[in-house]
Amino acid sequence: MFEVVIGLEVHAQLNTKTKIFCSCPTSFGEEPNTNVCPVCLGLPGALPVLNEEAVRKAISFGYAINATVNKKSIFNRKNYFYPDLPKGYQISQFEIPIVENGELFITLKDGKTKRIGITRAHLEEDAGKNIHHGNESYVDLNRAGTPLLEIVSEPDMRSAEEAVEYLKKLHAIVRYLDISDANMQEGSFRCDVNLSIRPKGDDKFYTRVEIKNLNSFRFIQKAIEYEVERQIEAWEDGTYEEEVVQETRLFDTKTFETKSMRGKEDSAEYRYFPEPDLLPVILTEEMLESGKNIPELPDEKKERFVKDYKIKEYDATVITASVEMARFFEEMIDEGASPKLAVNWLTVELVGRLKGEPIEKSPVNAKKLASLVKRIEDSTISGKGAKEVLDHLMENDIEVDEAIEKLGVKQVSDDGAILAMIDEILSKNADKVEEYKAGKEKLFGFFVGQVMKASKGSANPQLVNKLLKERLSS
Ligand code: ADP
Ligand code: MG
Ligand code: ZN
């Protein structure tokens, strides 16, 4: 039996307006090579100036993961040659990163909580992009110099599921802190997976490979599954030594296989040395203090939802997994929707109808969904009627009450109208009324059904129940 050992390196692009060492904008999707200047082009003599916003964002991340925020940290040059790196080195942090020794907690399928250590988080600049068209290659340096926070975990994860849960939690944290857009498709939240296997019970670490090119949770899952399989097979075939070597592997998004890309560089090969053009980063008391001022994070929000709104732990986890979803829910509550119904109408009915689109794209906003929920609560419509209304609202930009009128789904909650229907049903079924009164109580359901049918489903069922009981006991 084998155990899987996984450690993750995440590069989160910080959402500052300008780059980390110059004042070029960080906007995405511009004409190639338009957001550039002598600093990010690496022209001789150009000097970097550190962006304070990037530092502030790194500090608040540090506090959010319970880490040590180093009052003094140092930038280093990491030397390597690649066309998208015009200086021939990347400015990064090495011996003394800004953030060290943090942690976050993931919730597993069985409901248990597991701690994942975060070794460090350091600031660095992004490289540009190489673009290949047929036989030609181009370099776009718009991204060069974009601030990154590289977040390195301890090798604490033991399955693809744990790795994905860790990433989702990390993703939620940076989004809650509003320090990164963390858009995986656009590359502002990138993950490398380090993976090895070992016989269960063994506590030493074996050779790891690093897998790159993973831009969705699904690909990460698939890459891990493939790689675990490959390493176990090699072990069992007796070819582990030759086939599992320390290297960088690329995930192929078509075949779902990982393929060897290059041997893994040793850190010595990067010839790290202190960046002579930048002073050490010394954080002021003001920066440290204001960095502690962080918004409510997913775990705290979840606890509060369970405690204050009495919703299920599972539902609270689903809702707080994304900051937009949590905001949507809270707005519904502020609008007066009851928490229980709000959970169901948000996470089941609305999310189901969004078919994978994010909640920000919902044509029905929190206020509208709350009005719909309130119409169920005040018995204007039934749950069934509300589903029809929501279907209609997904396609039409009209108010809830307007849609209720238009679709004619209002429940009859008028005692007189319902009593008239009840009396008619009872007089038509005088024999059954006799039987009921003689003790055949299950006929009650039959009467309810008949009244609902007579009202074509529009009668308020609670009221029908109540009035029928009164009539039959008199
Ligand atoms: P590098 O900077 O060369 O990539 P690090 O020592 O910083 O190397 O480790 C990178 C990542 O690899 C970390 O997330 C760490 O937890 C993980 N890691 C280290 N050893 C192993 C191993 N044997 N199996 C799986 N992951 C590992
Ligand atoms: Mg690495
Ligand atoms: Zn620039």
Image (cartoon, helix red, strand yellow):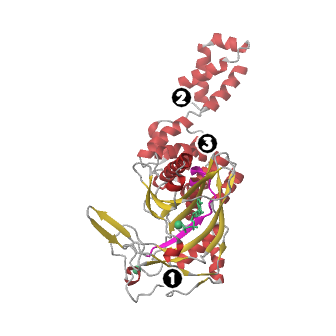
Nearest-to-viewer mark from 3 and 1: 1
The residue carrying mark 2 is 457
The front one of 240 and 35 is 240
Q: Can see residue 279?
A: yes
In this rendering, the answer to whether 285 lies above or below 434 is below
In this rendering, the answer to whether 456 lies above or below 173 is above
Q: Which of marks 3 and 1 is nearer the N terminus?
A: 1
Q: Which of marks 3 and 2 is nearer the N terminus?
A: 3
Q: Can see residue 404?
A: no
- Which residue type does callout 1 highlight? Leu
Left or right position of 415 against 353: right
Q: Position of residue 20 (x, y in %)?
A: 48, 78
Q: What element carries label 2?
A: loop
> Which residue is located at x 59 percent, y 22 percent?
449
**Residue found at the very far top of the displayed protein:** 431
Q: Where is residue 90 in the image (x, y as percent from the top left)?
A: 46, 77
Q: Is mark 3 on a helix, strand or loop?
A: helix
Which label sits on residue 50? Answer: 1
In this rendering, the answer to whether 403 lies above or below 422 is below
Q: Position of residue 410 (x, y in %)?
A: 52, 36
| Image quadrant in which the C terminus is located | top right
> Which residue is located at x 37 percent, y 80 percent?
41
- Which residue type does callout 2 highlight? Gly
Magenta residue span: 145-163
The residue carrying mark 3 is 377
Q: What element carries label 1?
A: loop
